[in-house]
Image (cartoon, rainbow, N blue to C red):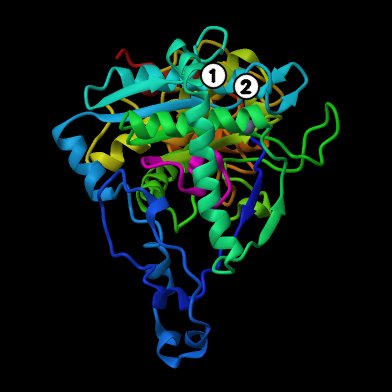
Protein backbone atom coordinates (compact mmCIF):
# COMPACT_ATOMS: atom_id res chain seq x y z
CA UNK A 1 0.00 0.00 0.00
CA UNK A 2 0.94 3.58 -0.37
CA UNK A 3 -0.94 5.61 2.13
CA UNK A 4 -2.13 8.74 0.45
CA UNK A 5 -1.76 10.93 3.44
CA UNK A 6 -2.88 11.02 6.98
CA UNK A 7 -4.92 13.95 8.11
CA UNK A 8 -5.73 14.79 11.64
CA UNK A 9 -8.99 16.63 11.88
CA UNK A 10 -9.54 18.96 14.73
CA UNK A 11 -13.11 20.02 15.24
CA UNK A 12 -13.50 23.04 17.49
CA UNK A 13 -15.93 22.51 20.32
CA UNK A 14 -17.81 25.54 19.04
CA UNK A 15 -19.58 23.20 16.67
CA UNK A 16 -21.78 22.07 19.50
CA UNK A 17 -23.54 25.41 19.34
CA UNK A 18 -24.46 25.00 15.70
CA UNK A 19 -26.96 22.23 15.86
CA UNK A 20 -24.39 20.03 14.20
CA UNK A 21 -24.76 17.51 16.93
CA UNK A 22 -27.64 15.38 15.79
CA UNK A 23 -27.51 12.66 18.36
CA UNK A 24 -26.36 9.13 18.50
CA UNK A 25 -27.67 6.62 16.07
CA UNK A 26 -26.68 3.13 15.24
CA UNK A 27 -28.89 2.91 12.22
CA UNK A 28 -27.15 2.15 8.99
CA UNK A 29 -27.58 4.02 5.74
CA UNK A 30 -27.58 7.43 7.35
CA UNK A 31 -26.92 10.06 4.76
CA UNK A 32 -24.19 12.13 6.31
CA UNK A 33 -24.53 14.68 3.49
CA UNK A 34 -27.75 15.88 5.01
CA UNK A 35 -26.07 17.03 8.18
CA UNK A 36 -26.06 20.81 8.39
CA UNK A 37 -22.67 22.44 8.13
CA UNK A 38 -22.70 25.86 9.71
CA UNK A 39 -20.24 28.38 10.90
CA UNK A 40 -19.78 27.91 14.63
CA UNK A 41 -20.35 30.79 16.97
CA UNK A 42 -16.80 31.81 17.81
CA UNK A 43 -17.68 33.16 21.23
CA UNK A 44 -18.09 29.63 22.48
CA UNK A 45 -14.45 28.82 21.93
CA UNK A 46 -13.40 30.28 25.22
CA UNK A 47 -16.52 29.33 27.08
CA UNK A 48 -15.20 27.65 30.24
CA UNK A 49 -17.86 24.94 30.39
CA UNK A 50 -16.32 23.26 27.34
CA UNK A 51 -12.95 22.76 28.92
CA UNK A 52 -14.05 19.57 30.57
CA UNK A 53 -16.21 18.53 27.67
CA UNK A 54 -15.50 15.04 26.32
CA UNK A 55 -14.30 16.01 22.89
CA UNK A 56 -13.71 12.41 21.81
CA UNK A 57 -17.24 11.37 22.59
CA UNK A 58 -18.48 14.40 20.72
CA UNK A 59 -16.33 13.86 17.66
CA UNK A 60 -17.42 10.28 17.29
CA UNK A 61 -20.93 11.57 16.68
CA UNK A 62 -20.15 13.97 13.83
CA UNK A 63 -20.73 11.06 11.49
CA UNK A 64 -23.40 8.95 13.19
CA UNK A 65 -22.42 5.31 13.55
CA UNK A 66 -23.42 3.13 10.64
CA UNK A 67 -22.26 -0.07 12.30
CA UNK A 68 -21.65 -0.90 15.94
CA UNK A 69 -19.85 -3.77 17.68
CA UNK A 70 -23.16 -4.76 19.28
CA UNK A 71 -24.98 -4.81 15.95
CA UNK A 72 -22.39 -6.86 14.09
CA UNK A 73 -22.13 -9.36 16.97
CA UNK A 74 -25.91 -9.73 17.01
CA UNK A 75 -25.81 -10.40 13.31
CA UNK A 76 -23.30 -13.21 13.84
CA UNK A 77 -25.77 -14.88 16.19
CA UNK A 78 -28.79 -14.66 13.95
CA UNK A 79 -27.56 -14.54 10.35
CA UNK A 80 -24.37 -14.61 8.32
CA UNK A 81 -21.75 -11.89 8.71
CA UNK A 82 -20.91 -10.61 5.25
CA UNK A 83 -17.19 -10.20 4.58
CA UNK A 84 -15.66 -8.58 1.52
CA UNK A 85 -12.05 -9.46 0.74
CA UNK A 86 -10.20 -6.87 -1.31
CA UNK A 87 -6.69 -7.93 -2.35
CA UNK A 88 -4.95 -4.56 -2.72
CA UNK A 89 -3.92 -2.99 -6.04
CA UNK A 90 -4.56 -4.52 -9.45
CA UNK A 91 -2.81 -5.74 -12.55
CA UNK A 92 -2.01 -2.20 -13.72
CA UNK A 93 -0.91 -0.57 -10.48
CA UNK A 94 0.88 -3.42 -8.78
CA UNK A 95 1.81 -1.81 -5.46
CA UNK A 96 5.16 -2.66 -3.90
CA UNK A 97 7.74 -4.51 -6.00
CA UNK A 98 10.80 -6.38 -4.74
CA UNK A 99 12.81 -8.33 -7.29
CA UNK A 100 10.30 -10.64 -8.96
CA UNK A 101 7.73 -10.12 -6.23
CA UNK A 102 4.73 -7.96 -6.98
CA UNK A 103 2.59 -6.95 -4.06
CA UNK A 104 -0.62 -7.25 -6.05
CA UNK A 105 0.05 -10.98 -6.59
CA UNK A 106 0.97 -11.58 -2.95
CA UNK A 107 -2.25 -9.88 -1.86
CA UNK A 108 -4.29 -12.22 -4.08
CA UNK A 109 -2.47 -15.29 -2.70
CA UNK A 110 -3.23 -14.44 0.93
CA UNK A 111 -6.80 -13.54 0.00
CA UNK A 112 -7.16 -17.01 -1.55
CA UNK A 113 -6.36 -18.69 1.77
CA UNK A 114 -8.67 -16.32 3.63
CA UNK A 115 -11.45 -17.00 1.17
CA UNK A 116 -11.24 -20.76 1.76
CA UNK A 117 -11.26 -20.38 5.55
CA UNK A 118 -14.28 -18.09 5.67
CA UNK A 119 -16.08 -20.08 3.02
CA UNK A 120 -16.13 -23.26 5.04
CA UNK A 121 -17.55 -21.44 8.08
CA UNK A 122 -21.35 -21.25 7.92
CA UNK A 123 -21.46 -18.11 10.11
CA UNK A 124 -19.83 -16.06 7.34
CA UNK A 125 -20.62 -15.20 3.79
CA UNK A 126 -17.45 -14.24 1.97
CA UNK A 127 -17.11 -12.30 -1.26
CA UNK A 128 -13.85 -11.56 -3.01
CA UNK A 129 -13.30 -8.55 -5.28
CA UNK A 130 -10.60 -10.06 -7.51
CA UNK A 131 -10.22 -13.44 -9.17
CA UNK A 132 -7.80 -15.83 -7.52
CA UNK A 133 -6.60 -16.79 -10.98
CA UNK A 134 -5.12 -13.87 -12.84
CA UNK A 135 -5.99 -11.22 -10.26
CA UNK A 136 -8.47 -9.29 -12.40
CA UNK A 137 -11.57 -7.89 -10.76
CA UNK A 138 -14.40 -10.42 -10.69
CA UNK A 139 -17.19 -10.02 -13.22
CA UNK A 140 -19.45 -8.55 -10.54
CA UNK A 141 -16.98 -5.79 -9.74
CA UNK A 142 -15.76 -5.30 -13.30
CA UNK A 143 -19.35 -4.77 -14.48
CA UNK A 144 -20.10 -2.52 -11.53
CA UNK A 145 -17.12 -0.25 -12.28
CA UNK A 146 -18.16 0.05 -15.92
CA UNK A 147 -21.91 0.33 -15.60
CA UNK A 148 -21.98 2.48 -12.47
CA UNK A 149 -19.06 4.74 -13.31
CA UNK A 150 -21.10 7.93 -13.27
CA UNK A 151 -22.85 7.16 -10.04
CA UNK A 152 -19.52 6.19 -8.45
CA UNK A 153 -18.08 9.55 -9.57
CA UNK A 154 -20.99 11.47 -8.07
CA UNK A 155 -20.77 9.41 -4.87
CA UNK A 156 -17.09 10.35 -4.68
CA UNK A 157 -17.87 14.01 -5.26
CA UNK A 158 -20.66 14.09 -2.66
CA UNK A 159 -18.46 12.59 0.00
CA UNK A 160 -15.50 14.80 -0.81
CA UNK A 161 -17.65 17.94 -0.88
CA UNK A 162 -18.95 17.14 2.56
CA UNK A 163 -15.47 17.15 4.07
CA UNK A 164 -14.36 20.06 1.92
CA UNK A 165 -17.23 22.13 3.28
CA UNK A 166 -16.11 21.40 6.79
CA UNK A 167 -12.57 22.39 5.86
CA UNK A 168 -13.59 25.59 4.08
CA UNK A 169 -15.78 26.74 6.91
CA UNK A 170 -12.81 26.39 9.22
CA UNK A 171 -14.67 23.90 11.36
CA UNK A 172 -12.18 21.20 10.50
CA UNK A 173 -8.44 21.63 10.34
CA UNK A 174 -6.24 19.77 7.97
CA UNK A 175 -3.08 18.58 9.57
CA UNK A 176 -0.87 16.56 7.27
CA UNK A 177 1.29 14.32 9.41
CA UNK A 178 2.84 12.23 6.64
CA UNK A 179 2.97 12.79 2.91
CA UNK A 180 2.29 9.66 0.90
CA UNK A 181 1.67 8.92 -2.72
CA UNK A 182 -1.88 9.54 -3.78
CA UNK A 183 -3.79 6.67 -5.29
CA UNK A 184 -3.83 7.13 -9.07
CA UNK A 185 -7.15 8.58 -10.29
CA UNK A 186 -8.50 5.35 -11.70
CA UNK A 187 -7.58 3.40 -8.56
CA UNK A 188 -9.32 5.99 -6.41
CA UNK A 189 -12.51 5.65 -8.47
CA UNK A 190 -12.39 1.86 -8.09
CA UNK A 191 -11.86 2.09 -4.32
CA UNK A 192 -14.82 4.46 -3.95
CA UNK A 193 -16.72 2.06 -6.20
CA UNK A 194 -15.89 -0.83 -3.87
CA UNK A 195 -17.09 1.19 -0.88
CA UNK A 196 -20.30 2.11 -2.67
CA UNK A 197 -20.85 -1.51 -3.67
CA UNK A 198 -20.18 -2.64 -0.09
CA UNK A 199 -22.72 -0.10 1.23
CA UNK A 200 -25.34 -1.27 -1.26
CA UNK A 201 -24.65 -4.94 -0.58
CA UNK A 202 -24.78 -4.77 3.18
CA UNK A 203 -21.15 -5.77 3.74
CA UNK A 204 -20.39 -5.91 7.45
CA UNK A 205 -16.63 -6.07 7.19
CA UNK A 206 -14.23 -5.21 4.37
CA UNK A 207 -10.71 -6.60 4.61
CA UNK A 208 -8.15 -4.90 2.40
CA UNK A 209 -5.04 -7.03 2.05
CA UNK A 210 -1.61 -5.48 1.51
CA UNK A 211 2.11 -5.81 1.99
CA UNK A 212 4.15 -2.80 2.91
CA UNK A 213 7.33 -1.28 1.56
CA UNK A 214 10.00 1.05 2.84
CA UNK A 215 10.09 4.00 0.42
CA UNK A 216 13.71 4.82 1.28
CA UNK A 217 14.87 1.37 0.12
CA UNK A 218 16.85 1.07 -3.13
CA UNK A 219 16.50 -1.64 -5.78
CA UNK A 220 17.13 -5.13 -4.46
CA UNK A 221 18.15 -4.01 -1.00
CA UNK A 222 15.87 -4.76 1.92
CA UNK A 223 14.46 -1.80 3.78
CA UNK A 224 14.84 -0.79 7.36
CA UNK A 225 11.42 -1.87 8.61
CA UNK A 226 9.65 -5.12 9.25
CA UNK A 227 6.41 -6.37 10.77
CA UNK A 228 2.68 -5.98 10.42
CA UNK A 229 0.28 -3.10 10.99
CA UNK A 230 -3.49 -2.79 10.88
CA UNK A 231 -5.05 0.42 9.62
CA UNK A 232 -8.50 1.38 10.87
CA UNK A 233 -10.84 4.30 10.11
CA UNK A 234 -10.10 7.47 12.07
CA UNK A 235 -12.29 7.67 15.14
CA UNK A 236 -14.73 10.28 13.85
CA UNK A 237 -15.97 8.08 11.07
CA UNK A 238 -19.23 6.20 11.23
CA UNK A 239 -17.56 2.80 10.98
CA UNK A 240 -14.68 3.54 13.36
CA UNK A 241 -15.64 1.90 16.63
CA UNK A 242 -16.62 -1.49 15.20
CA UNK A 243 -13.54 -1.53 12.96
CA UNK A 244 -11.16 -0.80 15.80
CA UNK A 245 -12.84 -3.37 18.00
CA UNK A 246 -12.37 -6.10 15.38
CA UNK A 247 -8.79 -4.95 14.75
CA UNK A 248 -7.81 -5.50 18.37
CA UNK A 249 -9.18 -9.04 18.37
CA UNK A 250 -7.33 -9.72 15.14
CA UNK A 251 -4.11 -8.27 16.51
CA UNK A 252 -4.31 -10.58 19.54
CA UNK A 253 -3.96 -13.58 17.23
CA UNK A 254 -1.53 -12.19 14.66
CA UNK A 255 0.94 -10.85 17.20
CA UNK A 256 1.50 -14.33 18.62
CA UNK A 257 3.03 -15.53 15.35
CA UNK A 258 4.18 -12.44 13.48
CA UNK A 259 6.32 -9.44 14.37
CA UNK A 260 4.69 -6.04 14.74
CA UNK A 261 5.86 -3.15 12.62
CA UNK A 262 8.96 -1.40 13.89
CA UNK A 263 8.30 1.59 11.65
CA UNK A 264 7.89 4.58 14.00
CA UNK A 265 4.96 5.75 11.83
CA UNK A 266 3.21 2.49 12.71
CA UNK A 267 3.83 2.68 16.44
CA UNK A 268 0.98 1.01 18.29
CA UNK A 269 0.27 -1.33 15.33
CA UNK A 270 -3.40 -0.38 15.01
CA UNK A 271 -3.26 2.90 13.17
CA UNK A 272 -6.15 5.27 12.59
CA UNK A 273 -6.16 6.77 9.13
CA UNK A 274 -8.34 9.57 7.91
CA UNK A 275 -7.54 9.55 4.23
CA UNK A 276 -7.41 5.91 3.18
CA UNK A 277 -10.24 5.35 0.73
CA UNK A 278 -10.24 1.64 1.56
CA UNK A 279 -11.26 2.47 5.11
CA UNK A 280 -13.97 4.87 4.05
CA UNK A 281 -12.27 8.24 3.80
CA UNK A 282 -14.72 11.11 3.44
CA UNK A 283 -17.29 8.96 5.23
CA UNK A 284 -17.70 6.69 2.22
CA UNK A 285 -18.04 3.32 3.96
CA UNK A 286 -20.84 2.10 6.22
CA UNK A 287 -19.54 -1.31 7.22
CA UNK A 288 -16.44 -1.99 9.29
CA UNK A 289 -13.17 -1.86 7.36
CA UNK A 290 -9.61 -2.91 8.04
CA UNK A 291 -6.52 -2.51 5.93
CA UNK A 292 -3.99 -5.19 6.76
CA UNK A 293 -0.33 -4.59 6.05
CA UNK A 294 0.90 -8.11 6.66
CA UNK A 295 4.57 -7.19 6.63
CA UNK A 296 7.25 -5.60 4.46
CA UNK A 297 7.57 -7.23 1.06
CA UNK A 298 11.32 -7.88 1.42
CA UNK A 299 11.10 -9.79 4.72
CA UNK A 300 12.79 -13.21 4.63
CA UNK A 301 9.66 -15.26 5.24
CA UNK A 302 8.04 -13.93 2.05
CA UNK A 303 10.93 -14.59 -0.35
CA UNK A 304 11.14 -18.34 -0.89
CA UNK A 305 8.07 -19.70 -2.73
CA UNK A 306 7.62 -22.82 -0.55
CA UNK A 307 8.11 -21.02 2.76
CA UNK A 308 5.95 -18.14 1.54
CA UNK A 309 3.08 -20.47 0.72
CA UNK A 310 3.10 -21.82 4.28
CA UNK A 311 3.54 -18.38 5.82
CA UNK A 312 0.63 -17.00 3.79
CA UNK A 313 -1.52 -19.92 4.89
CA UNK A 314 -0.61 -19.05 8.45
CA UNK A 315 -1.29 -15.32 8.01
CA UNK A 316 -4.75 -16.23 6.74
CA UNK A 317 -5.28 -18.82 9.48
CA UNK A 318 -4.47 -16.35 12.27
CA UNK A 319 -6.55 -13.64 10.59
CA UNK A 320 -9.52 -15.97 10.38
CA UNK A 321 -9.09 -17.00 14.02
CA UNK A 322 -8.80 -13.38 15.15
CA UNK A 323 -12.06 -12.47 13.44
CA UNK A 324 -13.79 -15.66 14.52
CA UNK A 325 -12.82 -15.05 18.14
CA UNK A 326 -14.18 -11.51 17.93
CA UNK A 327 -17.62 -13.02 17.44
CA UNK A 328 -17.09 -16.15 19.49
CA UNK A 329 -14.47 -15.55 22.21
CA UNK A 330 -14.59 -19.21 23.29
CA UNK A 331 -13.87 -20.51 19.82
CA UNK A 332 -10.99 -22.95 19.75
CA UNK A 333 -9.64 -24.39 16.53
CA UNK A 334 -9.48 -28.17 16.77
CA UNK A 335 -5.90 -29.46 16.84
CA UNK A 336 -2.94 -27.09 16.83
CA UNK A 337 -3.38 -23.34 17.04
CA UNK A 338 -1.22 -22.92 13.96
CA UNK A 339 -1.56 -24.12 10.38
CA UNK A 340 2.18 -24.91 10.36
CA UNK A 341 1.54 -28.04 12.44
CA UNK A 342 1.27 -31.00 12.36
CA UNK A 343 4.44 -31.64 10.42
CA UNK A 344 6.46 -34.78 9.81
CA UNK A 345 10.10 -34.06 10.65
CA UNK A 346 12.37 -36.26 8.55
CA UNK A 347 15.70 -34.48 8.19
CA UNK A 348 18.41 -33.40 10.59
CA UNK A 349 18.32 -29.64 11.01
CA UNK A 350 21.07 -27.29 12.01
CA UNK A 351 22.20 -23.70 12.08
CA UNK A 352 22.81 -22.23 8.64
CA UNK A 353 19.81 -23.82 6.89
CA UNK A 354 17.66 -21.25 5.18
CA UNK A 355 14.33 -21.07 3.35
CA UNK A 356 13.38 -24.45 4.81
CA UNK A 357 9.81 -25.59 5.34
CA UNK A 358 11.12 -28.04 7.97
CA UNK A 359 12.76 -25.18 9.87
CA UNK A 360 9.54 -23.18 9.61
CA UNK A 361 7.62 -26.06 11.21
CA UNK A 362 10.39 -26.50 13.78
CA UNK A 363 10.03 -22.85 14.77
CA UNK A 364 6.25 -23.31 15.03
CA UNK A 365 6.75 -26.40 17.23
CA UNK A 366 9.19 -24.53 19.46
CA UNK A 367 6.69 -21.67 19.57
CA UNK A 368 4.03 -24.11 20.78
CA UNK A 369 6.50 -25.08 23.51
CA UNK A 370 6.84 -21.36 24.36
CA UNK A 371 10.56 -21.65 23.64
CA UNK A 372 10.50 -19.58 20.45
CA UNK A 373 11.35 -16.78 20.36
CA UNK A 374 13.85 -17.77 23.06
CA UNK A 375 13.86 -15.88 26.39
CA UNK A 376 14.38 -12.12 26.14
CA UNK A 377 13.96 -12.11 22.37
CA UNK A 378 10.85 -11.16 20.43
CA UNK A 379 9.41 -12.08 17.04
CA UNK A 380 10.99 -8.98 15.54
CA UNK A 381 14.48 -10.30 16.32
CA UNK A 382 13.47 -13.96 15.91
CA UNK A 383 10.72 -14.26 13.32
CA UNK A 384 9.14 -17.57 12.28
CA UNK A 385 10.68 -17.54 8.81
CA UNK A 386 12.27 -20.88 7.90
CA UNK A 387 15.84 -19.68 8.53
CA UNK A 388 17.85 -21.57 11.16
CA UNK A 389 19.94 -18.96 12.96
CA UNK A 390 21.00 -18.35 16.56
CA UNK A 391 17.37 -17.87 17.73
CA UNK A 392 16.34 -21.31 16.51
CA UNK A 393 19.55 -22.90 17.78
CA UNK A 394 18.98 -21.50 21.26
CA UNK A 395 15.34 -22.62 21.30
CA UNK A 396 16.27 -26.14 20.12
CA UNK A 397 18.83 -26.41 22.92
CA UNK A 398 16.17 -25.43 25.46
CA UNK A 399 13.78 -27.98 23.93
CA UNK A 400 16.44 -30.67 24.26
CA UNK A 401 16.99 -29.76 27.90
CA UNK A 402 13.26 -29.86 28.57
CA UNK A 403 13.11 -33.44 27.25
CA UNK A 404 16.55 -34.33 28.52
CA UNK A 405 15.85 -37.98 29.35
CA UNK A 406 14.59 -38.79 25.87
CA UNK A 407 16.83 -36.51 23.84
CA UNK A 408 20.14 -35.97 25.63
CA UNK A 409 20.70 -38.83 28.05
CA UNK A 410 20.78 -41.56 25.34
CA UNK A 411 23.86 -39.91 23.84
CA UNK A 412 25.46 -39.00 27.18
CA UNK A 413 24.84 -35.29 26.70
CA UNK A 414 23.95 -32.96 29.55
CA UNK A 415 23.29 -29.73 27.74
CA UNK A 416 21.28 -28.98 24.63
CA UNK A 417 23.34 -28.68 21.47
CA UNK A 418 20.92 -26.86 19.21
CA UNK A 419 21.43 -29.53 16.55
CA UNK A 420 18.32 -31.45 15.55
CA UNK A 421 19.45 -35.07 15.20
CA UNK A 422 17.64 -38.39 15.49
CA UNK A 423 16.55 -38.21 19.15
CA UNK A 424 15.30 -34.65 18.80
CA UNK A 425 13.48 -35.56 15.59
CA UNK A 426 11.84 -38.47 17.35
CA UNK A 427 10.57 -36.22 20.14
CA UNK A 428 9.38 -33.57 17.70
CA UNK A 429 7.47 -36.17 15.71
CA UNK A 430 5.98 -37.63 18.84
CA UNK A 431 4.58 -34.23 19.76
CA UNK A 432 3.92 -32.59 16.41
CA UNK A 433 3.40 -35.07 13.62
CA UNK A 434 0.12 -36.39 14.96
CA UNK A 435 -2.43 -37.47 12.43
CA UNK A 436 -5.37 -35.13 12.42
ZN1 LIG B 1 -0.38 -2.04 -0.92
Range of residues picked out in magenta: 271-288
Looking at the picture, how far across and down is residue 68, in whole percent? Answer: 29, 50
The residue located at (49%, 54%) in the rendering is 234
Q: Determine if residue 349 is in view.
A: no
Judge left or right: residue 312 versus residue 204: right
In which quadrant of this rendering is ligand 1 seen?
top right
Check contact, mark 2 vs mark 1: CB within 8 A.
Answer: yes
Residue at mark 2: 104
Say above or below: 276 vs 311.
below
- Mark 2 surroundings within 10 Å by alpha-carbon count, few (fewer than 14), some (14 through 19), many (20 or more): many
- Mark 1 surroundings within 10 Å by alpha-carbon count, few (fewer than 14), some (14 through 19), many (20 or more): many
The residue located at (21%, 36%) in the rendering is 76
The residue located at (58%, 52%) in the rendering is 376
Residue at mark 1: 108
Q: Secondary structure at mark 2?
A: helix
Query: How many numbered dots are placed on residues in this image?
Result: 2
The residue located at (28%, 17%) in the rendering is 120
Amino acid sequence: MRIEKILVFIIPVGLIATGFFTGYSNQRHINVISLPVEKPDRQFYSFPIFESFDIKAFLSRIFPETITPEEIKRKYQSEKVRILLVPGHDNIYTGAVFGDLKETELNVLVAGYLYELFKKDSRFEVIIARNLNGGFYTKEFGDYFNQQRNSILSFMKERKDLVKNLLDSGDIKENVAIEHNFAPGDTAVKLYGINKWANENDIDLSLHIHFNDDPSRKGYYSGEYSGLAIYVPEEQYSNARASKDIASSLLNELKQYFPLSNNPLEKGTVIEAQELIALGSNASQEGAALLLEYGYIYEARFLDPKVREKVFGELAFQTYQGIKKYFDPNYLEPGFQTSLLPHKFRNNLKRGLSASVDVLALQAALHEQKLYPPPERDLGACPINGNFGPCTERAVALFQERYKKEVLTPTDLFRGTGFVGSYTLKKLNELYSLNY
